[in-house]
Amino acid sequence: MRARDDIDERMPVVWPLPVRGEPFERADADIVRRMDAVSAATACAKLHAMGITRTAVQGPAALERGHRITGSALTLQFMPQREDVASGTGQEYVERDTALWAVLETVQPGDVLVVQAWGSAFTGCFGDMLVRYFRRRGGAGIVVDGRIRDAARVRELGVPIWCTGTTPHYASQSELFPWAYDVPIAAGGVLCLPGDIVVADDDGAVVVPAGKARALVEDAEDHEDWESFSRMRLDQGARLSDYYPLSPNSRAEYEHWRDERDVRGSNG
């Protein structure tokens, strides 16, 4: 393998990398906490009703079933390689000076790293060492519209990851290069801005625009609550059409049930 200095001498600077976007505000911590009770399906449906129709990240699925995350989005963008600008020939000796290493140094507890990797089947965006460091920094999870490597070791780390699969390739081995972070990205056909909220579970990952999060969580809390009531009634033998969705009569029944439950809760 060439030494890093030899690679730097061979590669003139055509465009300064990594690119970093403007400073941004992370999502409100209280909204993120409340959003933790909202499923990806409910978030997606509620956003659709609010007129935001492209929120479900297409392609990535849970590497390990049963994980669930909610957190403020950090963003990382891969771009196609062009050998006069950026090449992965030097492996990690080049990558450690890219957006991939840089974004990991900005991770704060509870962050969700969202990655634009163009659905590449040949780009292992993260492996054992990077995911291990992400975990140490307190990151909540990773959503990448591309692949990871070192799958067995990554699974052992227990970090929730949504990806399109696995590959033996390192991040810049084939067609892409870590280009920018803290910038708007397109992940699985969805626009994600730094500071948006990401909700992900076994149904997939959903991007909640930061400006819609409060209205969504207030509506979704009621939705999740009446759905729990409806499940109970269906399990007791009620008719589907009476309780999903709620009719005016069953809505009144639910509100009475909710009020009684809340009174019991307040009395200990």
Image (cartoon, rainbow, N blue to C red):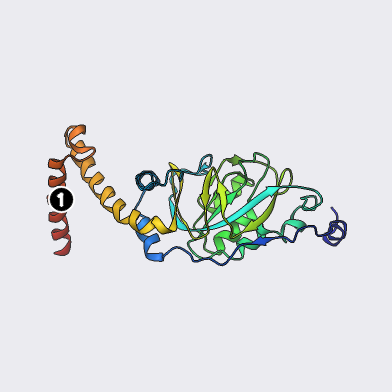
User: Going 15% across and 50% down the picture, which residue do you hit?
Assistant: 255
Q: Which quadrant: the C terminus? A: bottom left
Q: Nearer the viewer, residue 127 or 34?
A: 34
Q: Give the amino acid at mark 1.
A: Glu
Residue position for label 1: 255
Query: Eyeballing the image, is 48 above or below 25?
Result: above
User: Going 68% across and 49% down the picture, which residue do you hit?
Assistant: 79
Q: Identify the secondary structure beneath mark 1.
A: helix
Looking at the image, the residue that sits furthest to the front is 51
Dividing the picture into quadrants, the one containing residue 17 is bottom right
> With 183 as the anchor, is 262 left or right in this view?
left
The image shows residue 113 at horizontal and vertical percentages of 54, 55
The image shows residue 39 at horizontal and vertical percentages of 37, 48
> Is residue 268 among what the camera can see?
no
Q: Nearer the viewer, residue 255 or 139?
A: 255
Q: Nearer the viewer, residue 171 or 46?
A: 46
> Is residue 84 among what the camera can see?
yes
The image shows residue 253 at horizontal and vertical percentages of 12, 45
Query: Eyeballing the image, is 214 above or below 65?
Result: below
Query: Eyeballing the image, is 203 above or below 215?
Result: above
The image shows residue 190 at horizontal and vertical percentages of 51, 46
Q: How many marks?
A: 1
> With 27 as the anchor, is 165 left or right in this view?
right
How many other residues sit within 10 Å of disc 1, few (<14), some (14-19) or many (≥20)?
Answer: few
Q: Nearer the viewer, residue 263 or 176?
A: 176
Dividing the picture into quadrants, the one containing residue 236 is top left
